[in-house]
Amino acid sequence: MSALNSFVTVMAFTLRNKLRTKAFLITTLIIAIILSVVVNLPYIISAFSSGSVDSIGYIETSAPKVTGPLKAYYDKQEEPELKLVAFPDAGSAEANEKALKQAIANGDINGYLAFSPGEGADFPKVTYKSEELLAMGAPGSIPTVLQQIKTETVLKDANLTDAQKAQLFAPVEIDSVQITTSEGAGSVGEGKTPEERGVAMGLVYVLLFVLFLGIMVTGQLIATEITAEKSSRVMEVLVTSVSPLKQMFGKIAGMFLVGLSQIALYVVVFLINLSLPHNQGMLESMNIDLGAIDPLLIVYAVVFYLLGYFLYATLFAAVGSIVSRTEDLGQAVMPLTFLSLGGFYIGMFGMAQPNSTFVEAASFIPFFTPFIMFLRIGLADPAIWEVALGLGLLVVSILFFGWLSAKIYRTGVLMYGKRPSIKELRKAMKAYRV
């Protein structure tokens, strides 16, 4: 019972000590504010840009058979997305170019359309020019409208009826349905509709960030606190009252509760901002229904977060115990940082091809499993045995690295001076049994 009391005491002390730190509270508040801004960013941008419509200039005598219908298309819109502004012909191409550039400089237009004879066709070649660095093409729906005008120009002599034209221009719709082919072996799902896939992709994207940040932030906190106590010689006092192993697992549990409280706060802030009327309207316009989230996916998210946290937390604690100065900690934890970054980036880039061989293989590597296997569950349909194998390997890895980290921690907290070599560490570890 005393062992349990010591563990709970260390955990409570770590939790209480961190939650009272001004830097931690201020950082948490700042991140919550940033999260609120990010969630409402589309509305903020639209609020500042409301009433402003991009103006596109052109010379009224150049390609009137094109510019006439193009201008008429936007003029008849109740809330035009663009405004076409005609400029009189200045007498030469150079003078027209100069006048349009001056209009951009004066702020009258955002860019302009230039027309030149097309190759082997009646329809002219269109060039959009502006000061924007990434002006890769005409803005808005201009290319689509120009395509319609071109098609109508080509078909003007075909004597088609309005019904035939409407049928010709009607887009071809293709429904997309995900299926599963692993019924025999069992799978974690039965395929997803496009709406469910969209919601699942958004959820996976967000939770990959949460998992990565949770691992990195709490892991760094664990390593930093252990190294700080060791460098200030506080560790020498602590080991006389609480065994090093209880310290390590108590700190890991305490930091887990700290990280969990942060994530809970961010989730509440996110949901409150998402429930605002303007954000609800945006979700409805994008056909996003949060009710389509599979509850099982949330369960998997929690499971993989817990397992991923404890895998990396034990390693961060072990590394922090062998570093005597906080200045050296960044370099010492760099391999763990690269491992977590690797899992995160594979997950991000793997969202496009969750069934690729590389992604499937990476999902069975314990350091990557929390990211990649969760990605596959959310966006693909892995067999149940694959999920079970990934979870089993992850649990075994946690037990092994927990045992190894405990031995390293037990030895490292009392080793001062330069960071010990692997040979010195192994020799010292043999003196202790964990």
Image (cartoon, rainbow, N blue to C red):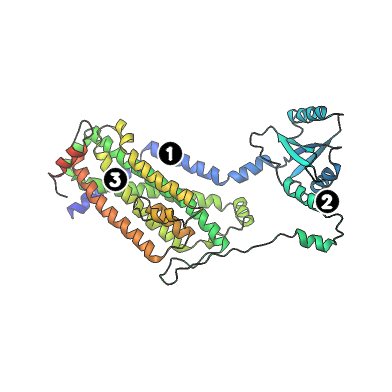
The reply to whether callout 3 and callout 1 are in contact (CB within 8 Å) is no
Q: Amino acid at mark 3?
A: Leu
Separation of disc 1 and disc 2 at Cα?
61 Å
* 2 or 3: mark nearer the eye: 2
Residue located beneath label 2 in the image: 153
| Neighbours of disc 1 within 10 Å: few (<14), some (14-19), many (20+) | few
Residue located beneath label 1 in the image: 27
The residue depicted at 80 percent of the width and 50 percent of the height is 149
Residue 361 picture quarter: bottom left
Circle number at residue 282: none
User: Which comes sooner in the sequence, label 1 or label 2?
Assistant: 1
Query: Where does the image place residue 223, in percent across and percent down from the top left?
Result: 30, 40
Extreme-left residue of the structure: 431
Query: Where does the image place residue 8, in percent across and percent down from the top left?
Result: 25, 50
Residue located beneath label 3 in the image: 315
The foreground one among 409 and 168 is: 168
Query: Where does the image place residue 393, in percent across and percent down from the top left?
Result: 31, 57
Can residue 188 be seen? Answer: yes
Can residue 237 be seen? Answer: no
Q: Amino acid at mark 1?
A: Thr
- Secondary structure beneath disc 1? helix
User: Which comes sooner in the sequence, label 3 or label 1?
Assistant: 1
